[in-house]
Amino acid sequence: MFTPHVSLLSTTVARWLIPATLSMVPVLSAQASTEALNQSEKKVMVSHQQSAVTQRKIDRLENDSQEIYQEYQHVMRQAETTEAYNRQLMRLTQSQQGEITSLQSQIESIEDTDRALLPMLVRMVNMLDKFVASDTPFLPEERQQRVERLQSLMDRADVSLAEKYRQILQAYRIEIDYGRTLEAYEGTVETTQGERQVTFLRLGRVALYFQSADGQISALWQPAERQWQTLAVKDNVTLKQAIRMARQQVIPELLNLPLPDQEADA
């Protein structure tokens, strides 16, 4: 009895729902598209942000790589400079080593020369000592003191061999110069009457005389006998004049003085 009414109601509802549902389909579809678009945009933005972050990382890596490369280039240049310096230093060291070897060889040669030179210098001093002792006895104290200074000098380690040699040569030159000069000086002499104050006259190395202060006694050194020979009275005046000439008190002139015996020259 009620079936037609229900059927009619169902039909009515169906007619209303179907259009309504169909009318909502575009709306739902548009909303879904918007949400999808928004999601896509978000994904794109996130992707862009991630790309930007990645790009910044890449930029930093590139900058870091460039800095590292520049530092590498700087280090390489320093290494090349250091290597060139080391090569130069090596050549310099080798050159210096060669010079050191040469100097050591020279020093050894000098040491050998020194070892040979020192005995020779000692012999020279000993020869001078013997010569002074056996020579005509003029300026005996001065000459003997010079020899003693040289003997003392030979024992000094703080004096170089060159300086020792120089002083020995100087002493020899002084002795040589005695043979070229005329000299008068005051001194004492031992006589039979005792020690006497006299004036000596040295005629180079040819002759040595003395005359007493009063001019009354004159003598000539005889090397052969190694003693004084008293001169004749007539020679006193001549010797006195020769003494004045040696002191440059009078004009030089030829004088006749006795000389040592010829045997003294042998």
Image (cartoon, helix red, strand yellow):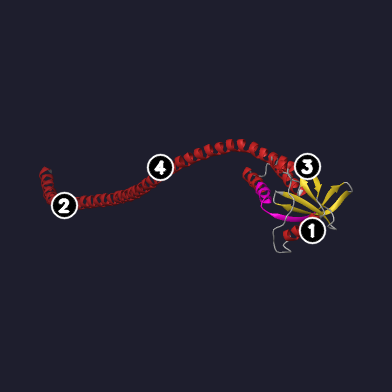
Categorize mark 3 by other alpha carbons within 10 Å: few (<14), some (14-19), many (20+): few
Q: As shown in the figure, which amino acid type bears the numbered disc 3?
A: Arg
Q: CA distance from mark 1 to mark 3?
A: 25 Å
Q: Nearer the viewer, mark 1 or mark 2?
A: 1
Q: Quadrant of the N terminus?
A: top left
Nearer to me, 103 or 152: 152
Categorize mark 4 by other alpha carbons within 10 Å: few (<14), some (14-19), many (20+): few
Residue named by callout 3: 226
Q: What SS does tag 3 mark?
A: loop
Q: As shown in the figure, which amino acid type bears the numbered disc 2?
A: Met
Q: Nearer the viewer, mark 2 or mark 3?
A: 3
Q: Is residue 179 magenta?
A: yes
Q: Nearer the viewer, mark 4 or mark 1?
A: 1
Q: What SS does tag 1 mark?
A: helix
Q: Position of residue 54 (x, y in %)?
A: 30, 48
Residue range (magenta): 171-186
Categorize mark 1 by other alpha carbons within 10 Å: few (<14), some (14-19), many (20+): few
Q: CA distance from mark 4 to mark 2?
A: 92 Å
Q: Are marks 4 and 1 in contact (CB under 8 Å)?
A: no
Residue named by callout 1: 237
Q: As shown in the figure, which amino acid type bears the numbered disc 4?
A: Arg
Give the left or right position of residue 8, taking residue 232 as reference.
left
Residue named by callout 4: 87
